[in-house]
Image (tube, rainbow, N blue to C red):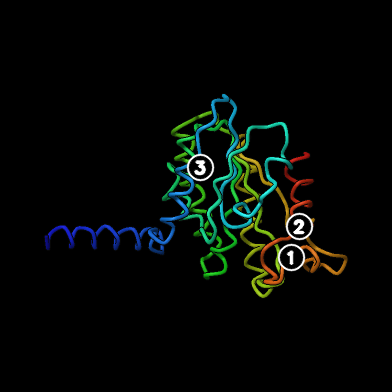
Amino acid sequence: MKIKVLTAFLVAFVNFCLYGQDPNRFSSEIERILNISVPEDEDVVVFTGSSSIRFWQQLNKDCDGIQVVNTGFGGSQMSDLLYFLDQTVLRFQPTEVYIYEGDNDIAVNKKPEDILTTTKQVVTRLRAANPDITIRFISAKPSPARWALKNQYEAFNRLLKNYCAEDDQLFYIDVWNPMLDTTGRPSSDIFISDSLHMNRAGYLIWKEVICEQ
């Protein structure tokens, strides 16, 4: 019995060291995602990432015309996506995947370069499963709640954009600039009361930038 407890502790410790936080904090979210049926369509598009994807309630309506599966799990970081890639993406065998991560990473003081390193690991695993997959990265968004971290977000977005520019299967989607007002700050009327998560007006911007291009 002691050996089993010790083994479980060591597994959790290794996961913590590799991914920065205990992945078990997402157990209920991952269970919810595992209950999503795999579509029978051949061309499946997965949207995944943190709460900005998780709370996109009208994603299927906004991206009408494509078979969309939403596997966002709130609070996640790029390292969490890497850890749960089988459950959130690979089991659906998508031809295309949209990823929104980096927002929470910056908020917990991860360096943009380190986030990009994990991003590359995600890409490697996706391509190992499907060499022809198209991967679209949604830039980190600006928000009033995290505006003090503006420089770090912009640095990460630059790295992500440059990385995608080097590969014709990777695409960078800029939502940062469309969400700024005429003063160059986040538009206050596109967020809910926490000044971090978007309201419907915010998602209509995403619809135009992401779904209608």
The image shows residue 46, relative to residue 204, as above or below, that is above
Name the kind of residue labelled 3 in the image.
Answer: Val
Judging depth in this view, the residue of 74 and 105 nearest the camera is 74
Whether tag 2 and tag 3 are in contact, CB under 8 A, the answer is no
- Asked if the residue at tag 1 contacts the one at tag 2, i.e. Cβ–Cβ closer than 8 Å, the answer is yes
Neighbour tally class for label 2: few under 14, some 14-19, many 20 plus, Cα within 10 Å: some
Viewed as shown, does residue 18 lie left or right of 212? left
Between marks 2 and 1, how big is the CA–CA gap? Answer: 7 Å
Q: Is residue 144 left or right of residue 1?
A: right
So how many labels did they put on this image?
Answer: 3
Residue that numbered label 2 is attached to:
202
Of labels 3 and 1, earlier in sequence is 3
Viewer-side label of 3, 1: 1
- Residue hosting label 1: 191
At x 45% / y 32%, what residue is drawn?
129
Q: Residue furthest bottom?
A: 148
* Whole-percent x, y for residue 150 in the image: 68, 69
User: Relative to residue 63, is residue 38 drawn left or right?
Assistant: left
**Residue 10 or residue 40, whichever sits in front:** 40
Res 86 → quadrant:
top left
Q: Which mark is residue 123?
A: 3
Q: Where is residue 14 shown, x and y percent of the image?
A: 30, 59
What amino acid is found at the position of numbered circle 1 in the picture? Phe
Going by the numbered disc 2, the residue's amino acid type is Gly
Looking at the figure, which quarter contains the N terminus? Answer: bottom left
Distance from the alpha carbon under mark 3 to that under mark 1: 30 Å
